[in-house]
Amino acid sequence: MLRAEIRAQLPPLTLQDFTPHTLAAIMALGAIRPDHADWLAQFMVEAQADGIDLAALKVQRRKPQLNRTEKRRIGLRSETPFSRLAFDMLTEKGRAAPLQALRATALQVSARQAAHAVQQRQREIGITHYVWIAGDDAEACPACALNNGRIFAWDNPPPGGHPGMRTCCAEGHCRCVAQAVFSDEEHHLPEDDRAPSDEGSTAAAPRRRLDVTGVVILAFLALACVSLLPLLPRWL
């Protein structure tokens, strides 16, 4: 199922869903001024209906527009629509690529919000570990590709953060996902990365001792059977 189809089946997100992530996204990319974080959260709410690309285009077409001289200063053609609102929200870094700045930052907000929702939901049902699933195309950055298939704990994020929280990928937002590791799969975890067990080491140690004892007994019985084989014809 496509992500858009999944989104369509979920209730619309609210301002409170986006607000915690807008400033983090702004600071991560540095293309939008921090004092526009609240505006960006409202933009994300409205963009759910039209999509980020179309919503960003509507912002660029708002009036008043920059004049031709101002557009030339930031490398835009005179016929390219660009509102004064869009210009004022951008930092110097953002003005170097003004048409991409709002879109990239909005995608970063969306990725962070989605990643946070996944983490929150998994923690609520007792999930402690996840498998990092990276994108299968060239836009996955080397760091994400290196983490692909590896198991991490929610309480111990890898360098750069959990899936969806990174900024190293091609478009400035991470599209990796966290696939839950359920409790009955934890025997596959590395020994130093297992979730804490309620039984603790005091219960695990007796189990190991019982396993070793069983192996010794079986080995002794096998040796006894082999030693008795020469005597078998005399008993028959």
Image (cartoon, rainbow, N blue to C red):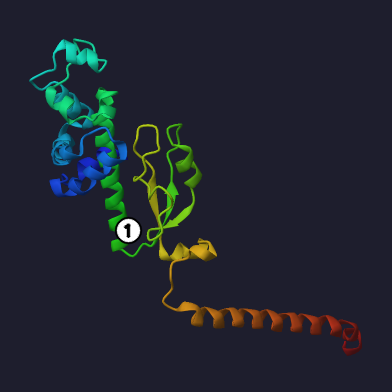
Crowd class of label 1 (few under 14; some 14 to 19; many from 20; radius 10 Å)? many
* Residue 185 vertical placement versus 34 (above, below): below
Q: Is residue 194 left or right of residue 14?
A: right
Q: Amino acid at mark 1?
A: Gln
Q: Is residue 130 left or right of residue 15?
A: right
Question: Where the C terminus falls, by quadrant?
Answer: bottom right
Residue appearing at x 17%, y 40% in the figure: 37
- In depth, the one of 236 and 169 nearer the eye is 169
Give the SS element for disc 1. Answer: helix
Residue lying at the far bottom in this picture: please name it.
235
- On the image, the x and y values in percent for residue 81 come to 17, 16
Question: Where the N terminus falls, by quadrant?
Answer: top left
Residue 107 quadrant: top left
* Residue 158 vertical placement versus 64 (above, below): below
Q: Is residue 66 left or right of residue 77?
A: left
Residue appearing at x 13%, y 38% in the figure: 39
- On the image, the x and y values in percent for residue 114 come to 28, 46
- On the image, the x and y values in percent for residue 56 come to 19, 28
Residue 72 quadrant: top left
Residue 65 quadrant: top left
- In depth, the one of 139 and 99 nearer the eye is 99
Residue 100 visible here: yes
- In depth, the one of 59 and 229 nearer the eye is 59
Residue lying at the far left in this picture: please name it.
64
- In depth, the one of 23 and 228 nearer the eye is 23
Q: Which residue is denoted by mark 1 in the rendering? A: 122
Residue appearing at x 13%, y 36% in the figure: 46
